[in-house]
Amino acid sequence: MEKKLLIVDDEKNIRNVINEYARFEGYETDEAEDGMQAVEKCRSNNYDLIIMDIMMPRLDGFSAVKEIRKTKQIPVIMLSARGEEYDKLFGFEIGVDDYVTKPFSPKELLARMRAVMKRSSAPENTLVTYEGLVIDVPGRSVTVDGVPASLTPKEYDLLFYMVANKGVALSREKLLSEVWGFDFYGDDRTVDTHIKMLRNSLGEYRKFIITVRGMGYKFDARG
């Protein structure tokens, strides 16, 4: 089945370039000229991935992502001429899956799209339980003592990766590489910030996320 891609950018030539390469890759594509139009399209369509520009008229990309996240958990790659680390960290905090800075190579963008789609796909019929912490892998949801936890997509990716490697001490560099992407230009603060957010989301089960001094973190559910 074809994957459906929504391309959101106020520059038509950018949309045309992404369209051409994405269709060659096998994606069914749709377009939006600004954040408001993207939100409206997401209300009436199901997409597998969104390429979202930041600086757009009517509604910027960050605001559009926050609005879309209220009802749908669609993977998002942000596309922008702005490359400041603050923008990247803010984007990841609201649920962005990757970040590409203009000007970009279409082939690099396709590689990032493949990586995001691979990370977003989950094995079927997988339910992981540790005491009152339940992780629904195909449903990409987490409950804490029966109450749904409000995790961003990146928090979920981080938690699931750590659970899949439970008991293994994972360096910050390893987590950046595996959860954010091999060429994400972040630093230790990116991991530490998301670990803090994740722990807050897990309540008493934050105890399962152990700090490995001088290295990183590990998930350990042993008493």
Image: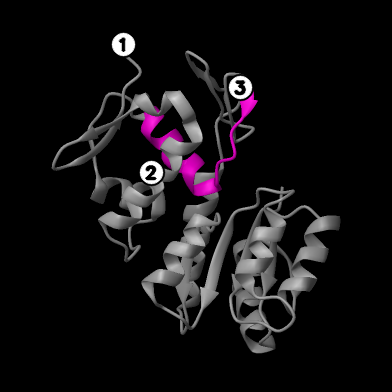
Of circles 3 and 1, which is in front?
1
- Which residue is at a point 86% across and 56% down the rendered structure image? 44
Disc 3 residue type (three-letter): Asn
- Which residue is at a point 66% across and 87% down the rendered structure image? 11
- Position of residue 171 measured from the top left corner of the image (x, y, whole percent): 22, 43
Disc 2 residue type (three-letter): Lys
- State yes or no: residue 150 in magenta: yes
Disc 1 residue type (three-letter): Gly
* Residue bounds of the magenta highlight: 147-164
- Which residue is at a point 75% across and 68% down the rendered structure image? 38
| Distance from the alpha carbon under mark 2 to that under mark 1 | 21 Å
Indicate left or right for 80 with 3 as reference.
Answer: left
Q: Can residue 111 be seen at all in this image of the molecule?
A: no
Please tell me in which quadrant of the rendered image residue 56 appears. Answer: bottom right
Of circles 2 and 3, which is in front?
2
Please tell me in which quadrant of the rendered image residue 188 appears. Answer: bottom left
For label 2, the crowd category at 10 Å Cα-Cα, with few meaning under 14, some 14 to 19 and many 20 or more, is: few
Indicate left or right for 136 with 84 as reference.
Answer: right
Which residue is the extreme one toward the left?
214
Secondary structure under tag 3 reads: loop
Q: Identify the residue position indicated by label 1 in the image.
A: 223
Q: Which mark is residue 125?
A: 3
**Vertical order, 99 against 218 (above or below):** below
| Distance from the alpha carbon under mark 3 to that under mark 1 | 27 Å
Main SS of residues in magenta: helix
- Position of residue 136 measured from the top left corner of the image (x, y, whole percent): 59, 27
Secondary structure under tag 2 reads: helix
For label 3, the crowd category at 10 Å Cα-Cα, with few meaning under 14, some 14 to 19 and many 20 or more, is: few
**Vertical order, 197 against 103 (above or below):** above
